[in-house]
Amino acid sequence: MWRLSHFPSQRLHLNLITTSSNLKRQNFRSFCPRAASKIQPERPTLDDVQRLSEGRAARTRGYGSRQIPHRLNADERQEYNRAKERGFLTLKGSGYRAERKGAPLANIWRQFNDANGRPCIVIEQQGPLDTVLLDLSPLRLLNNSLSSVEEALGQVAKELGVETFPPGSHGSPFTVIVPVDSFLEDEEGVESAAPSEGSSAGGGDIEDGRELTAAEEHTLTAPIWQQKPKLLFFRCERPVAKLLGKNLAAATGGGSMNF
């Protein structure tokens, strides 16, 4: 059994936009409980992610799966490269490709954000309103750590007049396979290899040195495609959706934008 003391100190280089007209920055760590900053989760390398996007095996065993589509076609790679520059991904609809039985672009974007320890921001363009999807699972935070993060990022949307939709109000484009274990079934539910629903996190504060529960160990060590997304949803017109994606990316350290 892992203990919290097994994970060295982690710095979350994330910033919060506090005013849309004057982009003031604050350290995102102030919104997370003390123990969360002392945990270093296991993550793929950027080289692993690049190899998966090319249809090759990751150098680190366990981060790829034949059941999870990651290989990009030429059009998807162009959008993937643009997403890395701006900090958020744009999909036509859910990005689902029938021949791959999933959305490779969404899956590899989630892997990329997991490797960087940043939230995964996706804009789904469909219908009269776009959906901005924010997945916090790549942060791999435990228990009540998520609530303050959700509140802080929700405020970024509120400054643009956009409200957060309830968890579970919209599916995600990611392919997820959560192991069928009793501890996961009791605490998080069981997912199959199909686009998954969002969920909320809860629980008490983490004390240094105590043993991790099985679910906490899973959060820290399992590949991201075995993690249920922790989702926030926002619906708005396309120009606002793009601005929201840009502001969320700036708030969480994504992209190459300078403010």
Image (tube, rainbow, N blue to C red):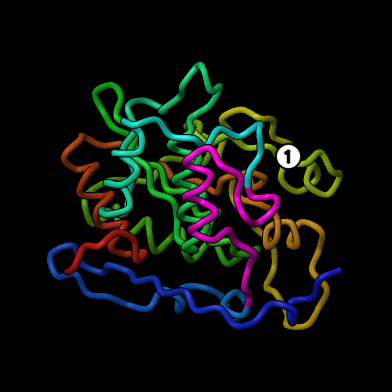
Question: In x, y percent, where is residue 163?
Answer: 33, 45
Task: Tell me: 58 left or right of 1.
Answer: left
Q: Indicate the quadrant containing the N terminus: top left, top right, bottom left or bottom right.
A: bottom right
Q: Is residue 7 above or below residue 103?
A: below
Front one among 77 and 250: 77
Front one among 139 and 95: 95
Q: Determine if the magenta segment contains residue 62.
A: yes
Question: In x, y percent, where is residue 100?
Answer: 53, 23
Task: Tell me: 21 left or right of 229.
Answer: left
Classify 10 Å Cα crowding around label 1: few (below 14), some (14-19), many (20 and above): some
Task: Tell me: 253 left or right of 174.
Answer: left
Q: Is residue 198 above or below residue 121?
A: above
Report helix, strand or loop for mark 1.
loop
Magenta highlight range? 39-63
Q: For the point 66% across and 33% down, which residue is it? A: 66
Is most of the magenta stretch helix, strand or loop? loop
Question: In x, y percent, where is residue 101?
Answer: 56, 22
Question: In x, y percent, where is residue 143?
Answer: 65, 63
Outermost residue toward the top? 98
Task: Tell me: 109 left or right of 125.
Answer: right
Q: Which residue is mark 1?
A: 189
Q: For the point 52% across and 73% down, which residue is it? A: 32
Q: For the point 27% across and 46% down, which residue is it? A: 82
Q: For the point 81% across and 38% down, which residue is it? A: 180
Front one among 53 and 2: 53
Residue 14 image-quadrant placement = bottom left
What residue type is disc 1 on? Answer: Gly
